Image (cartoon, helix red, strand yellow):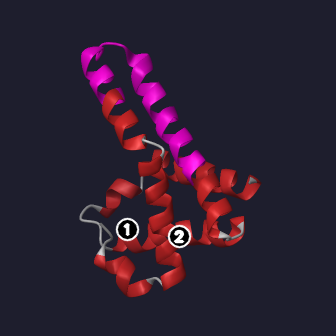
Amino acid sequence: MIPVTAWERLDGNDLKTIILHERTHIRLWHLWIFFLWDVLCSLLWVNPFLRFCAGKLREDMEHICDAVTIRQSGRDALSYGRLILKSLTLFREKAAFPAAFADGTAFRETQERLRRVRDY
């Protein structure tokens, strides 16, 4: 499912890259891993270490998908990083609660993700 904003403002190559990234999540079973992780966290909800690990798990999954997408799309890391920034900007414009993206955690996660893309 791709937001209308993406269809309207991104070119075909950018859309193909985004779809490739999301297909990589599906192909690598990330959705099932997240589901099982959520079940584990529900069962062991009193363990604060699991909440910390959940964030790291999601970061690792994104890092894997970013690396695979860069390799398979034929894009260089710079153009892929620009696409991430462009898509974050587009999706933030249409967000119901744009303040949710303003916290320091979201900024640090995006900064770290772009650093990893750059280092690739």
Q: Crowding near pointer 1: few (<14 within 10 Å), some, many (20+)?
A: some
Residue nearest the viewer, comparing 100 with 23: 23
Q: In the shown orientation, is residue 10 left or right of residue 1?
A: right
Quadrant where the image shows the C terminus:
bottom right
Residue 5 spot, x, y in % from top left: 34, 79
- Binning the other alpha carbons within 10 Å of mark 2 as few (below 14), some (14 to 19) or many (20 upward) gives some
Towards the viewer: 29 or 4: 29
> Which secondary structure, mark 2?
helix
Give residue 35's mark. none
Of tags 1 and 2, the one toward the viewer is 2
Region in magenta: 37-65
In the image, residue 51 lies in the stretch drawn in magenta: yes
Label 2: which residue? 17
Q: Position of residue 10 (x, y in %)?
A: 46, 82
Residue 30 is at least partly visible in this image: yes
The kind of residue on which mark 2 rests is Thr
Name the amino acid, label 1: Arg
